[in-house]
Image (spheres, rainbow, N blue to C red):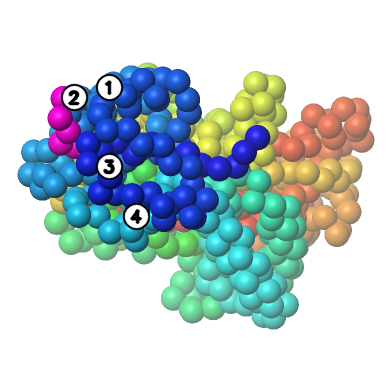
Amino acid sequence: MSDQRNILWVDDEIDLLRPHIKLLQAKGYGVETVTNGEDAIALVGQQPFDLIFLDESMVGMGGLETLAEIKDIDANLPVVMVTKNEAESVMEEAIGRRISDYLTKPVNPTQILLVCKKFLDGKKIKADYAQQDYIREFNQLAMKLMGPMEWKEWAELYARLAEWELEFDRHHNIGLEQTLGDQKRDANGEFSKYVEENYRDWLAMEKDDPERPTLSPDIIDRYVVPKLKEDSGPVFFFVVDCMRLDQWMAMEELLGEYFTINRDYYFGILPTATTYARNSIFAGLFPSEIEKHYPDLWTGDGKDDDHSQNKYEKELLDKLLERRRISLRSGVRYVKIIDTDFGRKIESEILDYAQSQMVAVVVNAVDMMAHSRSDYPILKEIAPDESAYRSLTKSWFTHSSLYGMLRTLAAEVPNARIILTTDHGAVRCLRGSKALGDRETSTNLRYKYGRNVKVDEKHAFYVKDPADFKLPKRGPAIEYVIAKEDYYFVYPTDYHYYLNHYRDSFQHGGISMEEMILPIAELKAR
């Protein structure tokens, strides 16, 4: 099979373009020529072409009419309009009829060659440069991992790795996916050590200490409260449960048309689970502080159901604003979107919500997607790896009520102050680790609490005294163990069944970049 790319050039003055055609042939392109639209349509129906140059003004069938017929035969065939006519109406009609590009005569050889490179070789050229750029940057990232890093440097390094993952998603079979995956695994190993060495100290530091990362309890104080004090428009605070940085980056690509986006980073608290992290965000307090100051609002009754332990987020937020002496004219409006129908209802009412000073919206779809993947084979088939998981998230977001709400706010409420973040991420678990405990020990796969919980210390971070880590005690002699990197805990009973069942599942609660280094974005309507 020939690798030659074939071009059809349609122009009733084709003889004047012979120098351009010879240049393209010299560059290895095959070029067929015709002088009218009828012959062009017939030829497109008979043989495949990779690109068409089409004159707009020809005797007989005109360029726009020819374009419509060609698109009926092959809607994906790129067609470049070449014309002397610079009228805006002609350009708009060509765009409306799905023209791929537009050149005005006289065209020079460089223009023609550039268009060919763009449409015929663009993907390969971009992939080659991406490959070269990553190889160049690989050593820089590896050197960073060998030295000490502060929390902001860790956030920047993880963001860079995530950006490379998205770049590789755009180029199939670039050949370096395994190398990037190995580098991320190495980074997670070093990151786990970094967190283990520093996490306890962060909790003892003042909020404004530069060595302390922004943590879950700091989010509303740092990003939401100042905007409420400005009182220059409604403040929307969106929390997308279980959204990783790479997933947010994929979603950002769709939002750039409507918003200017300022992305920042923060570290989720441990365990990176909804019960702890999201309650902490809304309360502006660590879990042990919530339990101490608002025992009626901390439902830490030992159940592992995250949703049952996050029933009082609005009340915790009200208490936080009360402590900050922020009085809202109509109070906080809070909604939690768990199912599609309710999400559509809120989307249809979002302009009504915009009459309030503050609206808090929790979106559970991404978390449900992560947990369902290990239980439904069809989801694992749709998203067999992290690249496909990002694609699935982007597809969900494209059709989601969240996307609809954001677009409506951009168009109808341009003064809305929008903060969007997550409570924790999720890591793809590939390595099991045996865990021992009594029947009262929790069942979570990435962290456990109980008496005498035993796991391999190389795979876990031990929390002997929960008070030191601002965690609820949950009873006498209770300890926490938190999985590191991509390990997940499995009990000895039916060990091999559960080892295989949960291998290659997305879980959260542990220490990894994907779970802890989280995006927080401010969106301003364009």
Q: Earlier in the sequence, mark 1 or mark 2?
A: 1
Q: What amino acid does circle 4 point to?
A: Pro
Q: Earlier in the sequence, mark 4 or mark 3?
A: 3
Q: Are marks 2 and 4 in contact (CB under 8 Å)?
A: no
Range drawn in magenta: 54-61
Binning the other alpha carbons within 10 Å of mark 3 as few (below 14), some (14 to 19) or many (20 upward) gives: some
What separation in Å lies between label 1 and label 2 (alpha carbons)? 7 Å
What is the quadrant of residue 377 in the picture? top right
- Identify the residue position indicated by label 4 in the image: 19
Q: Nearer the viewer, mark 1 or mark 4?
A: 4
Numbered disc 2: secondary structure: loop
- Identify the residue position indicated by label 2 in the image: 61
Please provide percent x and percent y for residue 357. Answer: 19, 46
Q: What amino acid does circle 2 point to?
A: Met
Q: Nearer the viewer, mark 2 or mark 3?
A: 3
Please provide percent x and percent y for residue 52. Answer: 36, 37
- Identify the residue position indicated by label 1 in the image: 38
Relative to 483, say whether 392 is above or below: above
Q: What amino acid does circle 3 point to?
A: Ile
Q: Nearer the viewer, mark 1 or mark 3?
A: 3
Residue closer to the observer: 356 or 311: 356
470 magenta-colored: no
Q: Are marks 1 and 2 in contact (CB under 8 Å)?
A: yes
Q: Which mark is residue 14?
A: 3
What separation in Å lies between label 2 and label 4 (alpha carbons)? 25 Å
Left or right: residue 185 compared with residue 327? right
Residue closer to the observer: 30 or 203: 30
Left or right: residue 178 compared with residue 339? right
Q: Are marks 4 and 3 in contact (CB under 8 Å)?
A: no
Binning the other alpha carbons within 10 Å of mark 2 as few (below 14), some (14 to 19) or many (20 upward) gives: few
Residue closer to the observer: 218 or 35: 35
